[in-house]
Amino acid sequence: MPKHVHMEGEAFRYMENSKELLKAASIEDNVYIDKKPVREAFGTAYLAVLEAINEALIKKGVTVKQLPKSVDGYRAALQKYLTVNNGKLLRSFEYLYESLHIAGYYRGLLHNVSTVKDEIKEAEVFINKLLR
């Protein structure tokens, strides 16, 4: 996908916001030196993943009121509606939960520029698989 294409949907909007947060973060020696914008970028990318799942669930007939409200709810919804014959999607979600939400956002453990960008890219790949 070309870099400057306007992406539709909330999930894509959140991904663009995540990338913008990273652009504003200071880098020295291939490491982000300010944790705050990096953690915000991870948090926003994780929200993009959740929004993508919400969109996919709505397309499957789940009502807004029935959308998951916890990570366990997202796991159950993925299993029930979206991964019937594809366990890879659930594994990808688990990986993104651990890398984006726990390591990147909650604990602020990821600082290496290439690592951070790779993790954000994984979120984008997941979203595109789900919605494109």
Image: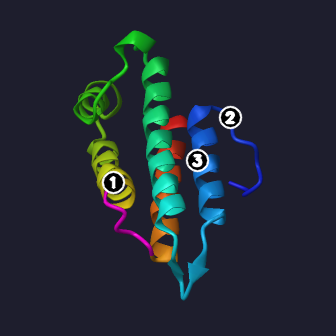
Q: Quadrant of the N terminus?
A: bottom right
Give the number of the mark in front: 3 or 1: 1
Give the number of the mark in front: 2 or 1: 1
Residue highlighted by disc 1: 106
Q: Is residue 125 visible?
A: no
Q: Is residue 103 visible?
A: yes
Q: Amino acid at mark 2?
A: Glu
The residue that appears at 36% across and 52% down in the rendered structure is 96
Q: Looking at the picture, tell me which residue is in the foreground, 74 or 41.
A: 41
The residue that appears at 48% across and 33% down in the rendered structure is 51
Q: State the image quarter where residue 78 is shown.
A: top left
Q: Is residue 48 above or below residue 60?
A: below
Residue highlighted by disc 3: 15
Asked whether disc 2 touches disc 1, contact meaning CB atoms under 8 Å apart, the reply is no
* Label placed on residue 8: 2
- Give coordinates of residue 84: x percent, y percent: 28, 31
